[in-house]
Image (tube, helix red, strand yellow):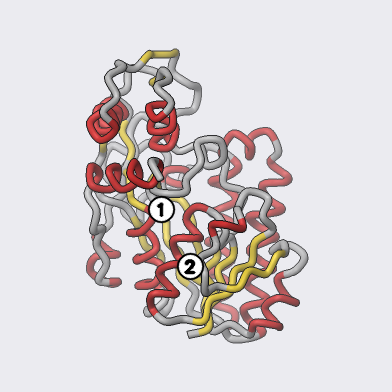
Amino acid sequence: MRSIVTGGAGFIGSHVVEALLARGDEVHVLDNLSTGRREHVPAGARLHEGDIRTNAEEIFDAVRPEQCFHLAAQADVPSSLEEPAYDAEVNVLGTVRVLEAARRHRAQVVFSSTGGALYGECERPATEETPRRPLAPYGISKLCGEEYLAGWNRLHGTSHVTLRFGNVYGPRQSASLEGGVVAIFLERMARDEPTRIFGDGAQTRDFVHAADVAGAMLAASRVEGGVFNVASGNATSVLELHELCRRVSGAEREPEFGPERPGDLRRSALDNGRARSELGWAPQLDLEAGLRDTWAWMQQ
């Protein structure tokens, strides 16, 4: 296949590029390098520096892709609260530009969405039918992107697919960009700096390794349409996560505790049953194994 990955120089995108190269694809990357890094693009893939809002059409015309894995996004929740118009410009308008560029070449789009930011507070693992109640502009803009994909499928007979991710972690995640708690904990432990837990640490999240997310994206490219949760299906408390991070890193410091942050979810986990049954996908790395992989990468 001839594939293009928007945001392919970023954290999750670079893992998708690796998986596509391993599949034997001709792989192209569209990235403006605002948060992605040139060195994250694996050898064998071609980087096209550009912006999905303004350059998608010309780059798609040059590449003529058969499939598009759309990961380019404004992905920071606090930034979406501070600059909601910019968040919408990238995540909504940018997605429309990608959809139209893909339509010119009859390319399927696999879209990266979010689970926790869409479903909000959940008493039990959320299924794809759980009511969507985004609490920040980031979740709202991702929901808009999902609706555009579904609308294009109805209007144009396309077969685009949406994947709703859990809390993704793994090599190449930056504590300063994506702000993932795994990256924050491990980076601080690597520097022997204090770690902080906000609130009591009992709040739960569903952690999934970036390599498993990449596998789900490739599996989704083999189906015609649909929405799928991509997560471990397990709720892990922040306290449990911190203890696992200490175990894999050998850090001895106990965490510090700070005040609970306004808007933080108490419970977030996703049901991955549909992805298991319809995509034939299941996560391969449990949390401790994934943390050991991430820690090993940080020591390089």
Q: Quadrant of the C terminus?
A: top left
Q: Outermost residue toward the front?
A: 300
Q: Nearer the viewer, residue 238 or 269?
A: 238
> Which residue appears at 41% of the width and 79% of the height?
224
Residue 84 percent across, percent down from the top left: 68, 41
Q: Which badge, 2 or 1, is on the more N-terminal residue? A: 2
Of residue 181 and residue 40, the one placed in the foreground of this image is 40
Amino acid type at mark 2: Val
Residue 116: x %, y % from top left: 41, 43
Query: Which residue shows up at 67% across the image and 69% down it?
Result: 48
Q: Which residue is mark 2?
A: 17
Q: Is residue 58 above or below residue 243?
A: below
Visible residue check, residue 145 = no
Picture quadrant where residue 294 is located: top left
Question: In what element is the residue under mark 2?
Answer: helix
Q: How many marks?
A: 2
Q: Give residue 242's mark.
A: none
SS label for mark 1: strand
Please tell me whether residue 84 is drawn above or below residue 47 in the rendered image: above
> Marks 2 and 1: which is nearer the front?
2
Choose between 180 and 94: the one closer to the eye: 180
Q: Position of residue 8 (x, y in %)?
A: 55, 62
In terms of image quadrants, where is residue 185?
Answer: top left
Q: CA distance from mark 2 to mark 1?
A: 17 Å
Contact (Cβ within 8 Å) of mark 2 with mark 1: no
Q: Is residue 279 visible?
A: yes
Instruction: Write down the residue under mark 1.
Output: 165
Q: Is residue 156 above or below residue 75?
A: below
